[in-house]
Image (tube, rainbow, N blue to C red):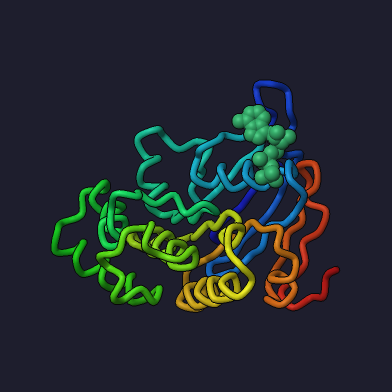
Amino acid sequence: MLVQFYNVSKIYPNGVKALDDISLKIDRGEFLFLMGPSGAGKSTLVRMLFREELPTRGQIFLASRSIVRMKRGEVPRLRRNIGIVFQDFKLLENKTTYENIAFAMEVVGASSKDIKERVTEVINMVGLKGKEKSFPGELSGGEQQRVGIARALTNYPLILIADEPTGNLDINTSHEIMELLFNINRAGTTVIMATHARELVKSAGKRVIMLEQGRIVADNPPGEIFL
Ligand code: ADP
């Protein structure tokens, strides 16, 4: 089991109960959609995985290690195991495709040889060969999201978290990005994707967890029809 949540609740200092007694298991290699209206607690749940937030109650394990009890000094290593893809890409506008991706490895102290090898590899993986020297402003939305995905993959994460990765993309581009995420998943990376895009979720045939007001209201196994 890769991820385990046991009776996790989160009450923010302002009194908002964002998660209410969540228990959840995610296997290695799963592809999982997280759905639910705005404010349901999706981001809070996801932020707990990389210890951006701590639960008020409950336990969370990643690969059998408690994220809650983890020492502060171990957090950077935890975060290297998790790749994050954002709705608004969060690329550095004054850096090229290559530099944006390399940056994620420079900050964790990789050697320049390893950086060169791995950046070339992930650029090929996401289909951006030939765009190494382009700046984000010279790329389409779909291409910018590919850079974001490549950057999230550089450190060989156990989990890829994608928060509304198609939220700023048209429908055709969204399908292309989904295909890329499915390929990454097929190659072994666990993927958790928060989204509002019902049509994409319906056609994907993957596990879907529905959150409402901080509770899991449905957990549909892959392929099960949901409306
Ligand atoms: P979603 O991602 O599904 O939109 P969130 O996890 O962002 O849901 O939010 C769940 C609830 O917690 C909402 O009511 C939101 O306003 C509240 N919330 C989120 N982050 C914070 C925070 N840092 N401080 C206080 N309340 C928060």
Q: Is residue 18 visible?
A: no
Q: Is residue 105 left or right of residue 227?
A: left
The quadrant the C terminus occupies is bottom right
Residue 191 screen position, x and y as percent: 55, 64
Going 58% across and 45% down the picture, which residue do you hit?
A: 60
Quick check: which quadrant has ligand 1? top right
Residue 29 screen position, x and y as percent: 54, 70
The quadrant the N terminus occupies is bottom right
Residue 36 screen position, x and y as percent: 76, 52
Query: Farthest residue toward the right?
Result: 227
Q: Is residue 1 left or right of residue 79?
A: right
Going 43% across and 62% down the picture, which residue do you hit?
A: 144
Residue 104, placed above or below residue 97: above
Q: Is residue 20 left or right of residue 194?
A: right
State the residue in front, 126 or 28: 126
Going 44% across and 56% down the picture, which residue do you hit?
A: 83
Residue 28 screen position, x and y as percent: 53, 67
Q: Is residue 60 visible?
A: yes
Query: Farthest residue toward the front?
Result: 138
Going 75% across and 44% down the picture, which residue do you hit?
A: 40
Residue 193, placed above or below residue 73: below
State the residue in front, 207 or 133: 133
State the residue in front, 47 or 4: 47
State the residue in front, 149 or 141: 141
Query: Farthest residue toward the top?
Result: 14
